Amino acid sequence: MIAVKAEGLVKRFGPFTAVDDVSFEVGEGAIFGFLGPNGAGKTTTIRMLCGLLQPTEGRATVAGFDVAREPDRIKESIGYMSQKFSLYADLTVKQNLEFYAGIYRIPRKKRAARIDTALGIAGLRGLERRLTATLAGGVKQRLALGAAILHEPRIVFLDEPTAGVDPASRRDFWDLISGLRGQGVTVFVTTHYMDEAEHCDCLILIYAGRKIAEASPRDLVTRVIRGEMLEVSGPPPGKVIARLAPDPRVRRAQVFGLTSRVLMEDGPGASEALKGILAEEGWPEARVRPIRPGLEDAFMHLIEREDERITAEGGRTR
Ligand SMILES: Nc1ncnc2c1ncn2[C@@H]1O[C@H](COP(=O)(O)OP(=O)(O)OP(=O)(O)O)[C@@H](O)[C@H]1O
Ligand SMILES: [Mg+2]
């Protein structure tokens, strides 16, 4: 079963194209990761899928309902956690959930049980009377998730639910996401964190409003990164990159923290060849070791390639 289907979605704000011909399908019960740098068009796409923003072109269905024609049916079927925290700071945890139970028109008789379930799922038992303003960032986000699932939606949209949250709380939050999937809920989530993207069943990368890749995390890396990936430590990465970038044996060279990551042409002896180049440049002491490329490498590669394409097109205007 298909939970979400987008076909040629476009959103323009005046002359600016924020989302440019984006299509995809999300299978029921999957964790679907929507990735892209700031301003890529993630929130705009989610808002169209949630029936909050009319697409300029294209169409989409969520839980079988058309986003343009049946936005009210969609709102009943989904949970939406917006990028901006939308609960009331001056209400307690329980009062916020009661408020949202009203918004979702949960019948009065069922409210107490639903709120109790949401408190359990979000790990908030014992915090019912805490003022929302006093909660730590990770707990606030769990509360926002609890509010988004009060009406037991089969599909949830989470827009950067872990932004700015500490690593331990981010892990806790992903345990909640896995728990939801375990119950058959479809999770559509955006994130900037690569370790989180690894947990998704399928990823889409959007950049400048366009979809530039779609695959499982593993396939994405193996499809995109062809060649031998080597890490250089020792010499200053900025200088190493500047020297290596024009070399024909080097496919790509990028700064990665305090090291440089170099993608060499396929073929034997890549490591020796690189050591040779580095020695010629006066860095005989440089350490070179093969590394397994990850999602971040794949994304940087794809974005660079897209930038080259945009430049070749003469600088696409959005
Ligand atoms: N109502 C609007 N009017 C004009 N431009 C808008 C509007 N909403 C969004 N945009 C622009 O559309 C582009 C995409 O914005 P969007 O919020 O969808 O990006 P995003 O991928 O969610 O980014 P972030 O990671 O920062 O949340 C941005 O350049 C943004 O400034
Ligand atoms: Mg956003």
Image: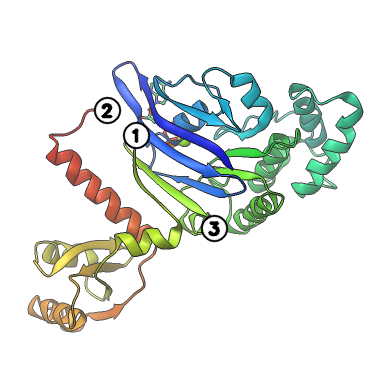
Within-10-Å neighbours for mark 3: few <14, some 14–19, many 20+? some
**What is the x, y in percent for residue 201?**
52, 55
Residue 195 drawn at (x, y percent): 49, 59
* Image quarter of the C terminus: top left
Q: Report the disc number at residue 209.
A: 1
Query: Is 163 in front, or is 151?
Result: 151
| Left or right of residue 265: residue 8 | right
- Which of the pair 220/294 is nearer the observer? 220
Q: Residues within 10 Å of mark 2 (few under 14, many from 20)?
A: some
Seen at 85% across and 41% down, the residue is 116
**Which residue carries the number 2 mark?**
318
42 is higher (above) or lower (below) than 31: above
Residue 98 in the figure: left or right of residue 267: right
Disc 1 Cβ-to-ligand 1 distance below 8 Å: yes
Q: Is mark 2 within 8 Å of ligand 1?
A: yes
- Give me the C-alpha separation between circle 3 and circle 1: 24 Å
Q: Quadrant of residue 37?
A: top left
Q: Is residue 289 visible?
A: yes
Q: Could you say whether the residue bearing mark 1 is in a helix, strand or loop?
A: loop
Residue type, numbered disc 2 = Arg
The residue beneath circle 3 is 199
Q: Amino acid at mark 3?
A: His
The image shows residue 178, relative to residue 157, as above or below, that is: below
Q: Is residue 236 visible?
A: no
